[in-house]
Every structure is written in structure tokens, then in C-alpha cells.
Image (cartoon, grey):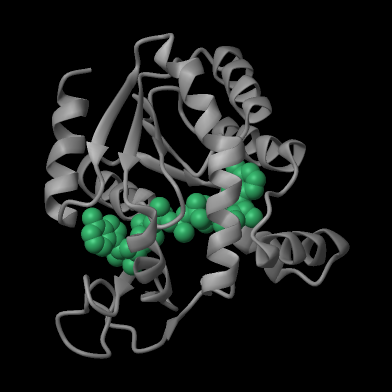
């Protein structure tokens, strides 16, 4: 199964993708995570990617589509994939069609997480991850069971993203409205879009996503 999780910054794409990985053994392909790896390197590309991400703008279509193609090339054709944060423009959507067709895969569902943008700023500015294993948490909505200790790996160090400040989040949302939301009609025309109330509690959203996948 190949699915896209679509929604603005903070909609819960990464949260739901992690649960599908844990529950179904699917592979999460997050272009945001890949770009965060790239920016760690002190190279011209790493510095260029860091500057774009910190402004809230989108990295070039060519770079992200090449990353997706490379990651897919390492997967068995029957491995289920969750595209998280990709595609984000019409050009990326067209590239994904070509990449999937070239690998004998087809897109089964596009799941749109519908959210109230004003609430997203709270979500994003409150989130953090385990520095060791990357598990996501939130100051108010998803705390570790034991304060200061990661539920998954027992790590004690946590980190926050540099682009998770209110000003950058507003730019990221504007980019979503201008460039990403307009790709939905492409998928609606194929009858593969399903919508989920992304403002519901995390477990409720997961149950809705599971129901959609059970119906593929
Ligand atoms: P990326 O890393 O993809 O960020 P994003 O799309 O802005 O999405 P987020 O990761 O912020 O949010 P999410 O929907 O995953 O929410 P999460 O589950 O964490 O991209 C970052 C940057 O990289 C971009 O700005 C761009 O520069 C670049 N980039 C990436 N992909 C690109 C591409 N394809 N093309 C070009 N550039 C690209 O949830 C947020 C918080 O809310 C968490 O703390 C979570 O615990 C909590 N939460 C989740 N669901 C709920 C719920 N139902 N109720 C309450 N709390 C919830």
C-alpha cells in the first residue's frame, strides 16, 4: 500500500505516520526528516537547505523528488510506504506519479488531515522530540509517561526544531495554502482522497486513518 498524508504544518502527519510504522510495518518517507539530515552536514547543499527551511519556504522540487526516488529504490516493491510531507507542489505530484509508475507501484490513498490553522501554532510551538530515537512529544498533548524520560528508548535528552517558531510557522502555512492545497484536485479526480478530522484526539485520528486503510 502507498499512501500520502497531507495537511498543513502541525496537522499530525508525522504523528500518524509513526503509528502506521509501528502498527503495520510500513515505511515512513518524510522529506522534512530527510532534509533535516541533509542540513546537519556542513556542505553548500546543507547550508542552502538550512536557510530555506528556517525561512519557512519550500526546498526545490528537484532536490526532494530525487531524495524520494533514492529512498524508494532501496525498498522491496511490496513494502508499504507512507509519504509524509511529500508531494508539496504540483511538480512534485507529477514527479511522484512518474517515480511510482517506474517502480510498478500505485498510489492507493491520499489522506487529508483537516485542521484549524489557529490551533496549529500551539501544537507546533509545544512539540519536541527525543534526541536519541526521534519519538515525538508535546508539552500539553503527548507527554512522556515519566517526566524527562523517553517512553520508547529511555533517553533523557530532547530537542526542538529551529523552524518551530510562530513567524516561520505562519510562512509555512502560507506556503501550504498557496502550493500544496492546490494539488488535492489532482487526486480527487482519481477518487483516492479521504478526509479525517485532524482536530480530534490523536487516538481518534489514528482510528479514522485505520478505518480508511482497512477499506483499500
Ligand atoms: P516538515 O518537516 O514536513 O514539516 P511540516 O509539513 O511543516 O509538518 P510538521 O512536521 O511541522 O507537522 P506534522 O503534520 O508532521 O505534525 P506532527 O505530527 O509533528 O517540513 C519542514 C520544512 O522542510 C518545510 O517547511 C520545507 O522548508 C521543507 N520541506 C519538507 N518537505 C518538503 C517538500 N516536499 N518540498 C519542499 N520543501 C520541503 O504534530 C505536531 C504536534 O502536534 C506534535 O507535538 C504532536 O504530538 C501534536 N499532535 C499531533 N496530532 C495531534 C492531535 N490530533 N491532537 C493534539 N495534538 C496533536
- Above or below — where is 38 with respect to 195? below
Q: In this rendering, would 18 be left or right of 210?
A: right
Residue 163: x %, y % from top left: 58, 69
Residue shown at 63%/20% (left/top)? 94
Rendering coords of residue 213 (x, y %)? 21, 27
Q: What is the tally of numbered marks visible in this picture?
A: 0
- Judged from this view, the residue extending furthest toward the front is 118
Along the viewing direction, whichever of 198 and 39 lies nearer the viewer: 198
Q: Residue at x 42, y 77 (%)?
A: 132
Front position in the image: 146 or 189 = 189
Residue at x 57%, y 17% (from the top left corner): 97
Q: Height in image: 209 above or below 126? A: above
Q: Give ligand 1's quarter of the image.
A: bottom left
Which quadrant holds residue 162? bottom right
Residue 88 visible from this viewpoint: no
**Left or right, 165 with reference to 187:** right
Q: Is residue 40 visible?
A: yes
In the displayed structure, would residue 107 be above or below residue 87?
A: above
Quadrant of the image occupied by residue 111: top left
Please state the horizontal and vertical placement of residue 184, each as a whole percent of the image.
Answer: 47, 25
Q: Tell me the residue at 35%/70% (across/down).
A: 122
Residue furthest to the top = 190
Quadrant containing the C terminus is top left
Q: Would you say 13 lies left or right of 141 here? A: right
- Residue 107 pos. (x, y %): 43, 19
Q: Quadrant of the N terminus?
A: top left
Amino acid at each position: 500500500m502507498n499512501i500520502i498524508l497531507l495537511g498543513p504544518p502541525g496537522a499530525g502527519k508525522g504523528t500518524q505516520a509513526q503509528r502506521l510504522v509501528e502498527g503495520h510495518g510500513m515505511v515512513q518517507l518524510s522529506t522534512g526528516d530527510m532534509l533535516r539530515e541533509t542540513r546537519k552536514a556542513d556542505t553548500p547543499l546543507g547550508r542552502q537547505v538550512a536557510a530555506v527551511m528556517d525561512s519557512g519556504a519550500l526546498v526545490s522540487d528537484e532536490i526532494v523528488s530525487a531524495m524520494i526516488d533514492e529512498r524508494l529504490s532501496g525498498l522491496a516493491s511490496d513494502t508499504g510506504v507512507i509519504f509524509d510531507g511529500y508531494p508539496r507542489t504540483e511538480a512534485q505530484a507529477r514527479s511522484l506519479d512518474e517515480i511510482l509508475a517506474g517502480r510498478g507501484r500505485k498510489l492507493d490513498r491520499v489522506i487529508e488531515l483537516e485542521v484549524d490553522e489557529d490551533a496549529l501554532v500551539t501544537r507546533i510551538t509545544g512539540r519536541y522530540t527525543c534526541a536519541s530515537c526521534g519519538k515525538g512529544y508535546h508539552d500539553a498533548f503527548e507527554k512522556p509517561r515519566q517526566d524527562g524520560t523517553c517512553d520508547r528508548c529511555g533517553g533523557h535528552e530532547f530537542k526542538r526544531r529551529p523552524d518551530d517558531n510562530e513567524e516561520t510557522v505562519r510562512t509555512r502555512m502560507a506556503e501550504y495554502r498557496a502550493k500544496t492545497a492546490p494539488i488535492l484536485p489532482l487526486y480527487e479526480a482519481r477518487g483516492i482522497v479521504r478526509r479525517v478530522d485532524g482536530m480530534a484526539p490523536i487516538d481518534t485520528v489514528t482510528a479514522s486513518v485505520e478505518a480508511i486503510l482497512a477499506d483499500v
